[in-house]
Amino acid sequence: MSLLKKTISGLFWTFTQQFSVQFINFTIQIILARILLPAEFGLIGMIAIFISVGNSLMDSGMTSSLIRTSNASQKDFSTVFWINLFASISIYIITFICAPLIANFYKQPILTLIIRIYTLSFIIRAFVGVQTTILTKEMNFKLQMSMQIPSVIVGGVIGIVMAYRGFGVWSLVWMNLTQSFLFSTQHWIRTKWYPAFIVDRERLWFHLKFGYKLTMSGLLNTIYDNIYNIIIGKFFSATQLGYYTRAQTLQMFPVTNIATALNKVTYPMFAAIQHDDARLKIAYKKLMQQVIFWIAPLMVYLAIVAEPLFRFVLTDKWLPAVPYFQLLCFSGILYPLHTYNLNILNVKGRSDLFLKLEIYKKIFISIGIMGALYFGIYGLLIFQLISSLFAFAVNTSYSGKMINYPVKEQIKDILPFIGIAFTVGALLFSLNKFIIVPLHPHDLIIIIMIGIIFWAVYLSINWKLKVPAINDFRHLILKR
């Protein structure tokens, strides 16, 4: 199969996997949000950073190294497997010991037991890190999807039943553990790879030399992705953190899925053509335009219908999260491009530069957060938008130089889509506020009506202007 056909097939199955799995998970989260209290979601939000940090550390970036290694053998895979397993056990022990300190930091005693049970997922997931990497390297996303869907459904059912029976926050804990266990078990039953008792020092050093820089970068990124949870959890209430995490979850549903799906496909694809800068630039440009062409209008649309959406989906008790959600929508427009840009650095073997850029961005965020905190939670949310723009500028500047695609040219290629999306959004916002809302239609009718008008106008304008993204979409996806 050619690289193009393999990539298109990979895109189809990874998007199918990502959105089907996450749609099921999203539906489960909505049901749980209607049952549980915001404060109970806030408790899980408080420990999110520690879960993410643990996941980053136990991988050591070596699975990314496996993907870019064209001649990876059983020595490579087995070495990474045993090192990741050892790391996950070590990290769990450290987390177990530190749990009371974390609970004391937030002044939430219940967090001690929650952390000790929830983080068992570190060890469970370490058993399938390499198997998942092999499937990703082969672009076999169809099998990944067929294993993930039943895991999410069964775990979700257990979580919902426990929530209805009054287990509160523990329904979220056991749902996660069930999903992790079932997903891991299926890998051992359905995939063809099993580890040998091999830890090769030479291969360990090879992957660690590349991977540790990605781990440090990922660790920094993880900490700062969750820094708002820490600050809101520490300086505000668990309920406010619950509002923030729900708003972020709803906003990140399309953004994260697009970013994750693209990352899974573009990283091995870019790795296959890493020495051909001309092809890299063409592929990079087309995919970047596709991302912005769809994600910019989607985020604008969601911001417009935020209030009826929250009321209809999550009930009135979550309405205080609406302004959080609207601000997060705007900061999420460029989010998929961050990972996408940095993939260029990875396939070029510049994990050192990857780490350097993460340090630059985190220094900027650290200084900005100290000033933003003075203006309360809304100051923090506005600064998230500013930091997203800064991250985009930094990432594109360095990755663009490597493939002769400067920042100005990149901005020129995506700005029309963003401009059209915001123009149509402004018109629809006025229509909704001054004409539709005064008529007092049902929330679902508002969501559907605004959606039909918004997308019809947005796509019509782009079609009339004959933007390249539409033709690329027809050629790549519709094959016309």
Image (cartoon, grey):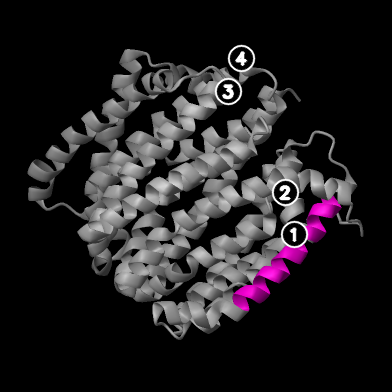
Q: CA distance from mark 2 to mark 3?
A: 23 Å
Please check the rendered image and state whether residue 64 is part of the magenta-colored stretch, yes or no: no
Q: Earlier in the sequence, mark 3 or mark 4?
A: 4
CB under 8 Å between callouts 1 and 4?
A: no
Residue 383: where, in percent of width, then height? Answer: 30, 48
Per the rendered image, the range of residues in magenta is 77-96
Residue at 29% x, 71% y: name it: 236
* Quadrant location of the N terminus in the rendered image: top right
Q: Quadrant of residue 225?
A: bottom left
Which residue in the structure is indicated by mark 4? 278
| Front residue of 233 and 134 | 233
Residue 83: where, in percent of width, then height? Answer: 78, 59
Residue 9: where, in percent of width, then height? Answer: 65, 32
Any mark on residue 84, and which?
1
Q: Amino acid at mark 1?
A: Asn
Any mark on residue 402, and which?
3
**Is residue 192 something one can see in this rendering?**
no
| Helix, strand or loop for disc 3 | helix
Q: Quadrant of residue 71?
A: top right
| Helix, strand or loop for disc 1 | helix
Q: Earlier in the sequence, mark 1 or mark 2?
A: 2
Q: Amino acid at mark 3?
A: Met
